[in-house]
């Protein structure tokens, strides 16, 4: 995210459909804000005069909006991390469920074989007591009798013991599946929390911007556009990338110029900051983790003086923003809502570190 505010338009939409939010939440927040403003407007001092809400200058609005955008991006990265963990847990749960289903089929087949064995023994004079025990309705008795059967050493004992082991393995898989499901539920709760935080921060920024006149908003937009004026041209790469993979990542970033910022997005039509860098390096054949605070540990950490095109540059003490360095002290990044993917100087934000994926 940039240190200045993007060109602001009257119509601003949050990607609620993409992130799982609802318009109802936005309307509720706006209603609360209206009620709060109404209460402030009707409050009276001891002398009976109306106490008006303090007026903010455009510069103060800009500062507050910048802060809200930065806080929203911190929450966005936490959301991205929780989503990555949830996706992993969901995939693991599906795998465990499939594995349990496959093992259950084998278990049922083994049980059918034991049934045939028992039927044959019955016709020839009765069922072996151990087999009868393990074919009872209580699954735990299968497990309890497995050791005895293995010591017996007979074909039928080994068959029943194998059945008992299959039953035990299914229980283990199902226990892992239950633990994974619990972890998934916890992660989805964290997802919801971070989503709410992001939407609230962005709604607050939107309400502040709505207090400005069109002329003031346009002036703020012009200031921000000056920091990324190269974005419209596409231009030439400012320096030669050190290797083909980095060159491909830089080329991808240039092709993304002008596409909108959407929190939680990874392309190809929209991006957030870490979504852009992840997609750019994916084009170069390198898989990066999803968040800024994990991407900084991907590859080799490098000093600012060693920067080369394709390197990842990180900002703020909490490592909440990332861009792709293109040389000449500039980067391509996805700043914040309302500001499309653009070129900007890396001095625009507090520099926190850099890494080289390849």
Image (cartoon, helix red, strand yellow):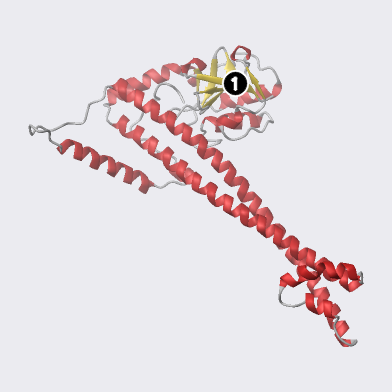
**Position of residue 249 measured from the top left corner of the image (x, y, whole percent):** 63, 25
SS label for mark 1: strand
- According to the image, label 1 marks what residue? 354
Q: Residues within 10 Å of mark 1 (few under 14, many from 20)?
A: many
Q: Residue at x 43, y 21 (%)?
A: 3
Q: Residue furthest left?
A: 47
The reply to whether residue 262 is in sight is: no
Q: Residue at x 19, y 40 (%)?
A: 39
Question: How many numbered marks are there?
Answer: 1
Toward the viewer: 226 or 195?
A: 195
Q: Is residue 58 left or right of residue 42?
A: right
Residue 51, percent from left and from top: 15, 32
Relative placement, left or right, of 315 versus 197 is right
Q: Quadrant of the C terminus?
A: top right
Residue shown at the point (53%, 27%) measured from the top left: 319
Horizontal side of residue 347 vs 44, given as left or right: right
Picture quarter containing residue 173?
bottom right
Q: Is residue 109 above or below residue 316?
A: below
């Amino acid at each position: 995210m940039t240190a200045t505010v993007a060109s602001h338009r009257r119509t601003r939409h949050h990607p609620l459909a993409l992130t799982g939010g609802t318009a109802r939440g936005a309307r509720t927040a706006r209603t609360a804000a209206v009620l709060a403003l109404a209460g402030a407007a009707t409050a009276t001092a001891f002398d009976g005069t109306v106490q008006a809400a303090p007026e903010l200058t455009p510069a103060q609005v800009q500062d507050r909006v910048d802060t809200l955008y930065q806080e929203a991006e911190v929450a966005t990265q936490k959301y991205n991390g929780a989503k990555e963990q949830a996706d992993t847990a969901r995939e693991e749960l599906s795998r465990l469920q499939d594995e349990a289903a496959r093992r259950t089929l084998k278990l049922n087949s083994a049980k059918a074989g034991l049934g045939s064995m028992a039927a044959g023994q019955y016709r020839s004079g009765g069922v072996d007591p151990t087999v009868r025990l393990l074919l009872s309705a209580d699954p735990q008795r299968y497990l309890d009798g497995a050791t005895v059967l293995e010591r017996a050493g007979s074909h039928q004992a080994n068959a029943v013991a194998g059945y008992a082991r299959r039953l035990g393995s299914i229980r283990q898989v199902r226990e892992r599946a239950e633990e994974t499901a619990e972890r998934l539920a916890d992660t989805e709760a964290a997802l919801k929390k971070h989503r709410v935080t992001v939407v609230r921060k962005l709604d607050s920024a939107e309400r502040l911007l709505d207090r400005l006149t069109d002329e003031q908003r346009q002036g703020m937009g012009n200031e921000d556009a000056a920091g990324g004026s190269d974005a419209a041209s596409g231009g030439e790469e400012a320096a030669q990338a050190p290797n083909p993979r980095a060159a491909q990542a830089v080329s991808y970033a240039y092709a993304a110029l002008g596409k909108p910022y959407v929190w939680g997005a990874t392309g190809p039509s929209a991006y957030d900051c870490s979504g852009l860098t992840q997609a750019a390096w994916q084009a170069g054949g390198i898989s990066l983790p999803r968040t800024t605070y994990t991407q900084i540990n991907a590859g080799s950490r490098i000093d600012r003086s060693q920067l080369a095109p394709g390197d990842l540059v990180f900002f703020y003490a909490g490592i909440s923003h990332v861009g792709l360095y293109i040389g000449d002290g500039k980067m391509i990044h996805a700043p914040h809502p309302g500001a499309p993917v653009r070129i900007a100087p890396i001095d625009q934000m507090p520099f926190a570190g850099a890494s080289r994926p390849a």
